[in-house]
Image (cartoon, helix red, strand yellow):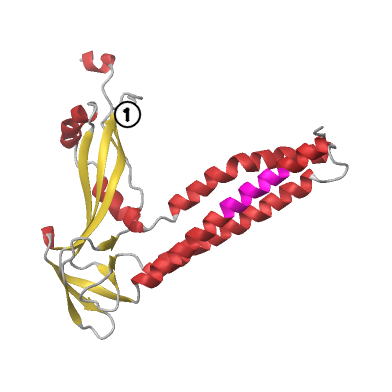
Amino acid sequence: MLTREIMGWIALAILWVNTLLVAAAALKDLGAIARKTRALGPFRRGRVVRGKGRSGALAGHRVEQVGRAGAEGGGREEIVFHDKSYGGEIYGGAVALEDGGREVTVAPAIDGQVWLSAEEQAAAAACPSEERFAEAYPHARKARGYSRTVEAQIREGATVWLGGEEPSAPRLLSTLDPQAWARSRMLRCAAFALATVVVCAACTAVALWPPVFGTVSKIGALLCLGFFLGVQPLGVTVRESVRSPEVRALRGRWQSGPVPSPDRATAG
């Protein structure tokens, strides 16, 4: 027969298995970031002198998206975008390295790794005009949706980091400091893994506070339940936040201007 005590221990065992799995996933992400950073290095900082791509771009990062019409609330039409695929291309050009000012010619690479900041990507994805929205919205209302390619570029004058042994054929071109990015994400993973175990231990301690199944113990049980329900979604959020910049989720939405109300439309 399952007594309250046995059921309680089973519940705690399930809680701890789930907690350790979430913490292990965060530590796995930490290790993946460390390995990726080592594989892409060493890194050299420089400034883009010229590029051979469109608009003088040295490299570009592309996100293929499909937009669909969202709920029309507040008198505004909107298109909600979802990512389909990610890719980068190095168009070639020249970069002046900071260590000695040497200028290197960067060779083109069709499948190059290109990192840009979230702000640069968001700027490239913004709706350029009401006319473009009006053109896209009818397609977004159809079953196939509105397809587009968002390209954020590294252009002349930009500060870049080149990753790899040979700067003329870099494994990575980035407007972010790759090592600083890696350190911050690794710290986030480690902090989350540690916090997950510590919070679970604290909830467990309250749940086992004598007398077991007393008022304090029941409060602890509720805390354990809340932690169990919340830690996995939080873990997914942390994992999304430490994704490598070349596969960082962009998504986004376009919104039209407010639609005039009937009263305003007939006024005057």
- Up-down relation of residue 73 to residue 115 (above or below): above
* Membership of 16 in magenta stretch: yes
Image point (55%, 61%), residue name: 190
* Quarter-of-image position of residue 181: bottom left
Is 145 left, or right, of 1 in this rendering? left
Q: Position of residue 135 (x, y in %)?
A: 15, 32
The residue pinned by badge 1 equals: 70
Q: Residue type at mark 1?
A: Gly
Q: Position of residue 242 (x, y in %)?
A: 44, 56
Determine the main secondary structure of the stretch shown in magenta.
helix
Q: Outermost residue, bottom direction? A: 100
Describe the element under mark 1 as helix, strand or loop: loop
Q: Is 202 in front, or is 263?
A: 202
Image point (34%, 65%), residue name: 176
Image point (72%, 44%), residue name: 12
Viewport quadrant of the N terminus: top right
Viewport quadrant of the C terminus: top left
* Membership of 139 in magenta stretch: no
Q: Is 150 in front, or is 84?
A: 84
Image point (56%, 44%), residue name: 232
Magenta residues, as a range? 12-23
- Up-down relation of residue 236 to residue 142 (above or below): below
Is 102 left, or right, of 229 in this rendering? left
Q: Position of residue 66 (x, y in %)?
A: 26, 38
